Every structure is written in C-alpha cells, then in structure tokens.
Image (tube, rainbow, N blue to C red):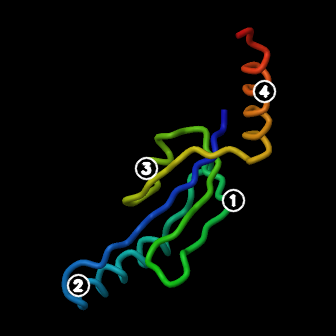
Amino acid sequence: MSVKHMISWFELPQGSPAEYENTQNRILEVFGQWEPPDNFNIEVFAVRAGEWGGHMLVECDDPLTVHKVSFEFQARPVVPVQEAVRVELEAMAWRDSLNG
C-alpha cells in the first residue's frame, strides 16, 4: 500500500560564514546529481520562503526508501482531508449508535 508522507527539513546555520557557504555549495552539488527512486513519487516539492528548509509531499510504499532519500528531516504520513472526514464521520456514527 502506498502511503503519502509530508517530509519537512530545516537547515540550521553553523560555523563561520565561510563554513556555512561551503556547506551550501556541497548541498547544491549533491542535490544537482540526485535522482528520486522509482517508487518515490514527488507530488509537491517546495522551499519555505525566507527560510532555509522546505517541504516535500511524496507517495511511497517503502518507508526505507523515505529514510534513505532524506537528510535530517521529519516525515509524517498524511491522508487527504476528504478521507479523514469520511472515517471520522464513520467513527462518530459508530460511537453514537452505542447504548448508554
């Protein structure tokens, strides 16, 4: 089963300005050569305006692929709001059907 993941990453500047610039150069060098795995469907890939970091919404059936692809990040499974509301309404209807 394929699961959607919202991956967020945050860059924290460390070291001297020259060290930070070298780090940024290396990140861009690596990213310029990166290819997403076949089972890693990127739906949204965005950088937060005015910050270092961003978000990527991916659909992937293998959590190890998600783990392998990212730098330091947070990944949380997500579901479409329509599906979340549907199952919440089902749970509420079941709860309301209980005696007591």
**Amino acid under label 1?**
Glu
Tally the marks: 4
**Amino acid under label 3?**
Lys
Q: CA distance from mark 1 to mark 2?
A: 33 Å
Disc 3 or 4, which lies upstream in sequence? Answer: 3
Q: CA distance from mark 3 to mark 2?
A: 26 Å
- Crowdedness near tag 2: few (<14), some (14–19) or many (≥20) residues, C-alpha within 10 Å: few
Query: Residue drawn 42% across and 57% down?
Result: 73
Disc 3 or 1, which lies upstream in sequence? Answer: 1
Quadrant housing residue 48: bottom right
Q: Which residue is mark 1?
A: 43
**Amino acid under label 2?**
Glu
Q: Which residue is mark 3?
A: 68
Q: Secondary structure at mark 4?
A: helix
| Residue at the extreme front of the image, as rendered | 100
Which residue is at the front of the view, 98 or 20? 98
Q: Are marks 2 and 4 in contact (CB under 8 Å)?
A: no
